[in-house]
Amino acid sequence: MLKTVSLFLVLMSVWLLLSGHYTPLITGFGVVSCLLSALIANRMDVNDKEGQPIYLGPRILSYWGWLVGEIFKANVDVAKCVLFPKKYLRPSIFTVTASQKSDLGKVIYANSITLTPGTVTVDLDGDQVMVHALTEGSAEDVLGGDMDRRVTKVMRET
Amino acid sequence: MMIYAITAIAILISIALALTRAILGPTSYDRILSANAIGTKTVLLIGVMGFLGGRPDFLDLALVYALVNFIGTLAVLKYFKFGTLRGTLSKPKPADNS
Amino acid sequence: MDLLLDIATWILLLAGSILLIITGFGLLRLPDLYTRIHAGGMADTLATFLIFVGLSLQSGFSLVSAKLLLVLVFVFFTSPTASYALAQASFVAGLKPKLDGFGTKKPSKDDV
């Protein structure tokens, strides 16, 4: 029940953000359609802990801040690699072990690897993540395991 | 402002380069990659064009375009992988054409 | 104050434009599909971030900035999923990554 209410509130805020027309009729349509969506999501059983991970709380926000910094650094690396491929381009493919237990944690980890340019997740099988890296530096960043530890900390798993 | 026009031209040049890659291929996956990149750049172009014309309402279109681009890429990839859009999401066995 | 914001917008949008053109060149000159995915990822992440932040500086604290932020978050959530699906599909289809692009062997003409 609490999940349905919070889903309704999230949908309603997105509606108000996007609509820009605050007449009673349009807002009424918004309330009805958001209520219907929340009820259907409830009935489809997709409105669970995984579909609505509020419990991650403010930790995920600080993780995003760190991730944006990493993306910045990785982009400079890849841009250098594109401009001077003979000097920097060292493609490699390797496997690392994800230490997260839940599916959501693994998805956050694999997506973070792909989101930083220079490393792309090629395959995710169990807890084995196959990574394709563009340069030596980007490969070392993943192999160092800093991102893995941070995601595990966000998920509150040891 | 001048900078909007400069950015729009840069985005168009970038789209032209991605289109060249889509024409060159060589595999169909390269073409899907180019189509996806062009889609992302179109989202940027819609946003910049909205500001260039003084009508930032265009951002709704950018949001919808991002959504269509994502779903379209996934749909084409699923069609390539399974040969059909209906059916399971389980992983097929790796093809052994070395 | 307005002048400062304008200068910041100029810098951010110019950086984004340069990065987009580098992305286009990367898509053309990198040797194989897997390395090209990295180049495409640049446009999805930092170029989008720079351009949208630059635009939202111009619109100030309003509904337009909120929409820009929403599009940005949406692109950041979906683009790695699309990249992963592409890389995984081509890997499962048996496309081998070229691991010696410019490293161990002499670059030949089909590498460039």
Image: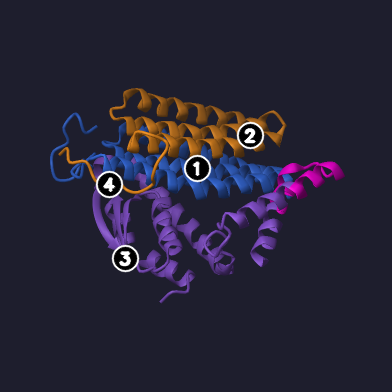
The reply to whether residue A79 is in sight is no
Circles 3, 1 touching at the beta carbon (< 8 Å)? no
User: Is disc 1 placed on a helix, strand or loop?
Assistant: helix
Q: Nearer the viewer, mark 2 or mark 1?
A: 2
Residue under label 4: A88
Label 4 – label 1 distance at C-alpha: 21 Å
The answer to whether dots 3 and 1 both sit on one chain is: no
Image position of C99 with respect to B44: above or below: below
Q: Residues within 10 Å of mark 4 (few under 14, many from 20)?
A: some
The residue positioned 57% from the left and 47% from the top of the image is C72
Q: For the residue marked with disc 3, what is the amino acid? A: Gly
The picture places residue C97, in percent across and down from the top left corner, at: 23, 42
Q: Is residue B94 left or right of residue C82?
A: left
Q: Residues within 10 Å of mark 2 (few under 14, many from 20)?
A: some
Q: Is residue C66 left or right of residue C81?
A: right
Circles 3, 2 touching at the beta carbon (< 8 Å)? no
Chain bearing tag 3 is A
Q: Is residue B66 left or right of residue C108?
A: right
The answer to whether dots 2 and 4 both sit on one chain is: no
**Residue A44, picture quadrant:** bottom right
User: Is disc 3 placed on a helix, strand or loop?
Assistant: helix
User: Is disc 4 placed on a helix, strand or loop?
Assistant: helix
Residue under label 2: B61
The residue positioned 21% from the left and 33% from the top of the image is C111
Chain bearing tag 4 is A
Residue range in magenta is A12-32
Chain purple in the figure, letter = A
- The secondary structure making up most of the magenta span is helix
Q: For the residue marked with disc 2, what is the amino acid? A: Leu
